[in-house]
Amino acid sequence: MNEGIKETFGEGDGELLRLSYSKALPMRLDRWLTSQRSEQSRARIQKFIDAGFVKVNGIPGKAKTPLRQGDEVLLWMPPPEPLPYLKPEQIDLDVLFEDEHLIVINKPAGMAVHPAPGHKTGTLVNGLLNHCTDLPGISGKLRPGIVHRLDKDTTGCIVVAKSQIALVKLQLQIQKRIASRNYLAVIHGAPNSEVGTITGAIGRHPKDRKKYAVVNDEDGRQACTHWELVERLGDFSLMRFKLDTGRTHQIRVHSAHVGHPIVGDPTYSRCRKLPINLSSQALHAVKLGLEHPITKVYMEFEAPLPNIFERLLLTLRKQNKASLH
């Protein structure tokens, strides 16, 4: 590792992190770094380690290196690779806020955030590259400017960085829970209490690799979801969720795990009768709060419910009212 790398966020400088391990019990280097860098996969972290970009107390680390209390970890993340193969596309975007450093979008259902197998075009990234001609890359993947993600069929607020310094600072806000992400969802059934928290590591489903599940700590990444009952609607409930972590399918997996899957979820809530026809799950990122990466002013953005979500609630309220008479 180049010890002379400056701790700056200019183009081509990469990112240098100095971290201290404070846990009482030992933990593998790759697992701990993954928990500290939630936007990076464990495989990606292991590649950084294999490339010699990680040192523990000044010595190059290995994935299995056990960390002990007081150890200093130095991680250098190389600058993003160029992404010349991404194609800008003319896509109408519902912009909630925009300045020279960031843009907040109300994402519709059916739109993937970034290109992936099966979704190479028509993504939010394709539309953003047309709307914003110069977006910073992230981790050498097809995700320029992406700070956090929403599932393809989840709607609502998503923030995208328009400068490298904004990208780094917004990612840190997500990791340190300075940024807040609130969701509204309709679930099957009703919880026994008014508020609660769901915890449990999330990883690949042991039998279906296209799904995720609550798994043992060794096989997944810790996740925490806070919930609040907003309205009881007969056999359904309107819920508010707040994320401490941002794992793939987190709210959907945690909800299904406790027996209350999201209405319309094609992966975790199959073969359940629905009050109306839905093309996607009833999960909406309704509010996003963050500190502006440059001005430090705290800002909140709210995305109105999609029409189909409003229609679902109207139908459920009518059915619930009729059942009470």
Image (spheres, rainbow, N blue to C red):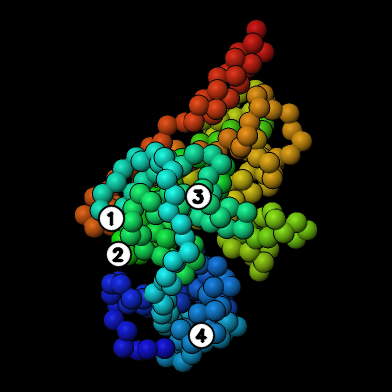
Task: Compute the Cα span from label 2 to label 3.
Answer: 24 Å
> Is residue 198 shown to the viewer in this render?
no
**Side (left or right) of 220 relative to 157:** right
Q: Disc 2, disc 1: CB below 8 Å?
A: yes
Q: Position of residue 65 (x, y in %)?
A: 56, 85
Q: State the residue position of label 4.
A: 51
Q: State the residue position of label 1.
A: 101
Q: Disc 4, disc 1: CB below 8 Å?
A: no
Q: Please tell me whether mark 2 or mark 3 is closer to you in this view.
A: 3
Q: State the residue position of label 2.
A: 165
- Dot 3 or dot 4: first in sequence order is 4
**Measuring 42% from the left and 32% from the top, which residue is drawn there?**
304
Q: Nearer the viewer, residue 238 or 97?
A: 97
Give the amino acid at mark 2. Ile
**Measuring 32% from the left and 84% from the top, which residue is drawn there?**
5
Q: State the residue position of label 3.
A: 123
**Measuring 47% from the left and 70% from the top, which residue is drawn there?**
140
- In which quadrant of the rendered view does residue 200 lie? bottom right
Looking at the image, residue 180 lies above or below residue 63: above
- Dot 2 or dot 1: first in sequence order is 1
Label 4's element?
A: loop
Label 1's element?
A: loop
**Side (left or right) of 94 relative to 193:** left
